[in-house]
Image (spheres, grey):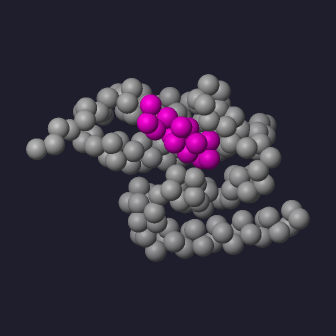
Amino acid sequence: MQKRERITVQGAIDRYADMVYRLALAQMKNTTDADDLFQEVFVRLVSHIQDLESWEHVKAWLIRVTVNCAKKHFGRYWNKNVDLVEDPGRIAAGGSGYEMPETDPVWEAVLRLPPRYRLAVHLYYYEQQTAAQIAALTQQKESTVRSQLYRAREMLRKMLEEER
């Protein structure tokens, strides 16, 4: 019988902090809100760590909670009625060890996608999740995720062609 590795909050932070922060940045499009979302996700992890059975379960749980917290954030009245000033192309994680290229035209185009397409693209290309995994995480059909990825690729292609 194989001994199960102990799952801890610090272990989850060490393994998945960059992934959660990248996903938070992709969803929030500004560092201030991404920092808040990142903190909220790991605070929630503290009270749920005992329910998680494996590191894959932790990873899936973190992605799901990050997406749900981002949706909740955008549902608040304040966030529906305030325009952001910060440049979404200038994204750098203070102290997390993660930086998104400032002049990457593909990343800048991804940030301009509608939220459902941005999420699918980010999880598929930046977090190497399969369409089936994304479907499970976002509680959608796999065919819906594949359609979102197809439509997002078309939007990105058009955006990048227009910039040439």
Side of 144 where 27 appears, left or right: right
Image quarter (top left, top right, bottom left or bottom right) of the C terminus = bottom right
Q: Where residue 156 appears, x then y in whole percent?
A: 72, 65
Question: How many numbered markers are drawn?
Answer: 0
Side of 142 where 54 appears, left or right: left
Q: Where residue 46 appears, x then y in whole percent?
A: 35, 28
Viewer can see residue 26: yes
Identify which residue, 27 or 82, lies in the foreground. 27
Identify which residue, 71 or 7, lies in the foreground. 7
Image quarter (top left, top right, bottom left or bottom right) of the N terminus = top left
Above or below — where is 80 with respect to 146?
above
* Residue at the left extreme of this rendering: 1
User: Which residue appears at 51% of the width and 71% of the height?
Assistant: 146
- Asked if the stretch drawn in magenta spans residue 24, the answer is yes
Q: Main secondary structure of the magenta part?
A: helix
Viewer can see residue 73: no
Above or below — where is 94 with respect to 16?
above
Q: Which image quarter: residue 95?
A: top right
User: Which residue appears at 27% of the width and 40% of the height?
Assistant: 52
Q: Give the magenta-colored segment's residue range.
A: 14-28
Identify which residue, 4 or 71, lies in the foreground. 4
User: Which residue appears at 41% of the width and 60% of the height?
Assistant: 133
